[in-house]
Structures are given as C-alpha cells and as structure tokens.
Amino acid sequence: MKKRLWSILLVGVMVVSMAGCGSSTNESASKEDAAETAAPAEEGTESTSAGGESGLIVYTQKTMNQYFHVALQEKVEEAVLGAGYEVEVANCNNDSTLQNDQFRNFISKNPKAIIANAVDSDALNDVTNEAMEAGIPVIMVDNPASTAVVSGSVKFDNVECGRMAAERIVELLTEKYGAAQGRLVNVYGAMSSECWRLRKEGFDEVISQYPDIEYIEVPGEGDRAKSQEALTNVIAQYNGEIDAVHCPSDDPGLGCAEALQIAGLWYPVGDENHVILVTGDGEPDAVQYLKDGYYDAIIVEDAYAYGPIAMELLKEYVFQGEPVPTSGTYTNEDYYWKTAEFMEGETGPILQIPPYAMDASNVNESGHWGAAALEASE
C-alpha cells in the first residue's frame, strides 16, 4: 500500500490573515472574442466604483480537510497577494451556518471584494445578496451559490465531469465483457453541494442508457471514512463480486481505494481481478495511484486555476467598472485544458472550466495540477 502523501499536510492546517506584498504577477492569460464587454482599463487605473478604497480581499473557504481545497486556497492567497492586496481567509469546516456568519463578518469589514466557495449552494444565497447590495463584488469559485446574482463565477463543468467518468467506465466494462454490462458501484457525494449533485446528474444520465449494467448507488457524502464504509458494505453484500467503482472526488475516493485494499480486491489494471476505479479532481495521491497502475482514470478539475482566474476577473473587469464577459473564449497555456468558455448564467457571468481525463496515456505530460503538486513534494 502506498504511503499517503498528504495526511501530514492536512493535519493542523491553520487559516491565517496575510499582508499584501505589494508586487504584481505577470499574467499570461488572454481573453479572446470576449463579446459584450469593453476593453479593460490600463494597469494602475482601477475604478473605486466597485469594492471601495479597501486594500483587503477576503476568501470564505468551505474546508481544509481535502487536499483539493488546500491547493485551491493556496492559489487564491498567492493570486491576491501577487496583485498587491491584503488577503484574509475564513474556513468554516463544512458548516454552512458558520460560513454565513463568517461571510457577514467579512461584509462588516467592507473589503475590496469577496471570493467565496460555498459549502451549501442554497444556504449562501441571502448573505451573498447582502454583500452585493452593499456594493462589495463577489466572485464565486468551485461551488457557487444557487440563486444569488454575483459579479462573476468561476465554475467547473460538473455535469460533463460526471458524463466523462460514466463513459470511461462503460468503455472499460465493454472491453472486459464485450458488451456494456457488469456491476457498477457509484459512491456519490453530498447532494447539498451543487458540484457533487451535478456530477451525479451527468453520471446517471449516461449509465441510464445501459440497462445491462447493474447500477448500485450508495451515499458517501464526500467523506473518506463514510465512502470507505459505504463501499465496504456493498462489497460484503455482493461477496466481493463487483466490476467497477466510481467516486466523484479524490479524497472520498481514497476511502474507496482503502475499501478495495481491505477486501483483497486491489489489483492493477490488466490483472483479471482488477476492479475498474474512476474518480474525479486529480489530487496527488490519486495521481500516484494512477501512475502505479491501480486507477483507470481521473476526470480532472483544476484546483490551481480558480484563484488566479478569480483575481483576473476582478482586476481586468470588476475593478475597472466593466462587466465580466458572458460570451467568448478564455485561453491560458499554463493549464492543461488551455481554453474555457465565458457564458451567461442565472447567477451572472460564468467562466466555465472544462474537465479532462487523465489516464496512463497522458499522466506524465505537463500541466496537470495534481502531478505538479506530487512532483513538488518529492
């Protein structure tokens, strides 16, 4: 069993306020064909019409118990500090009531902007509206509020992520049996999270087209221990006779990997006893398992992208008094996915980052956030 690379990192992580360094980053991203927007003002001519004169940008964080969110917060802090602002972070530890209280505390400080990652997409609507009504721009990242209209959202195409995971599993089951059949277990995440809810929606949409696949759905709630327990119970119920496992995120996915190991079902790809395993996000531990030959694929969500892009939207549009684009293409060669699409949503302008599949064919290519984090730890 491989040593857990990140267990020490996640223990005792403390959220602190940091002072701005006064430097600025070199921005390599470009916006192409961004219709319905005016050209941003020149550097150093920021408007005070949005967010006032404050030099503080705050981030409300959902959890630090998953490496994905540790990495996301790190990049938010780096981007804010690199743009010359002070940054303050509040971690609510997956408590939506606490997140609302922390959000209101941030509003009382009248920051330049709020960057937010919602625990519960519905629970954060009212307080998000309060911030916008107070003239404080809000950029939602990863998991947005469900109805509150904000300055902009940097979202992931979670429905497509679920579809891609299901399609890969169908493909692998077909390779195994000569037809789309077999017993598939989906250890799905908490339905209070829009991200996990949409991933399940996309996954179910594809699997429903294959009636010969025996589809077993069990709630893992996005928690590693609960996911391990849920899969362990299914393994026991079916005497270990399962063909494939899906988990929508890598941290709870590690619980699924542990369940397979404990049950004696941990065989590499290519072994006749191998249980197909497809997860989501692209965290370092999962990347290592992929490199070692035990995972079949990871549908990647780029944790490194949110902070820098949120800061770009603030600097290039919001702080200039310009609307975030609602159409056109965003391009950044630093990311493996390269291009994303601006679009108009019910909650305001959206930049939607696409998912992509990481597997044995491309795991050693550059641009994967989890692979970069893995290399940095070695």
Image: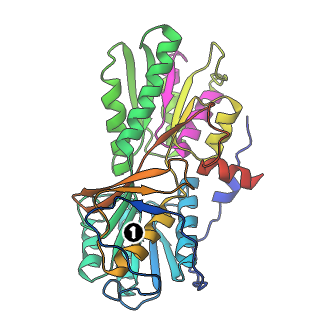
Question: Is 15 placed above or below 153 here?
Answer: below
Where does residue 205 sit, x and y in percent of width and height?
30, 30
Q: Residue at x 32, y 83 (%)?
A: 50
Residue in front for this viewpoint, 191 or 140 = 140
Start and end of the magenta stretch?
235-262
Residue on which the image places disc 1: 99
Residue at image x 62%, y 41%?
A: 286
Q: Is residue 286 toward the left or the right of residue 168 in the image?
A: right
Q: Name the one closer to the observer, 182 or 43.
A: 43
Residue drawn 49% across and 48% down? 301
Write down the quadrant of residue 270 in the picture: top right
Locate the N terminus and report the quarter of the image it occupies: top right
Q: Secondary structure at mark 1?
A: helix
**Closer to us: 312 or 69:** 312
Task: Give residue 28's quadrant in the image.
Answer: bottom right
Type of amino acid at the residue the image marks with label 1: Gln
Relative image position of residue 231 (x, y in whole percent): 50, 30
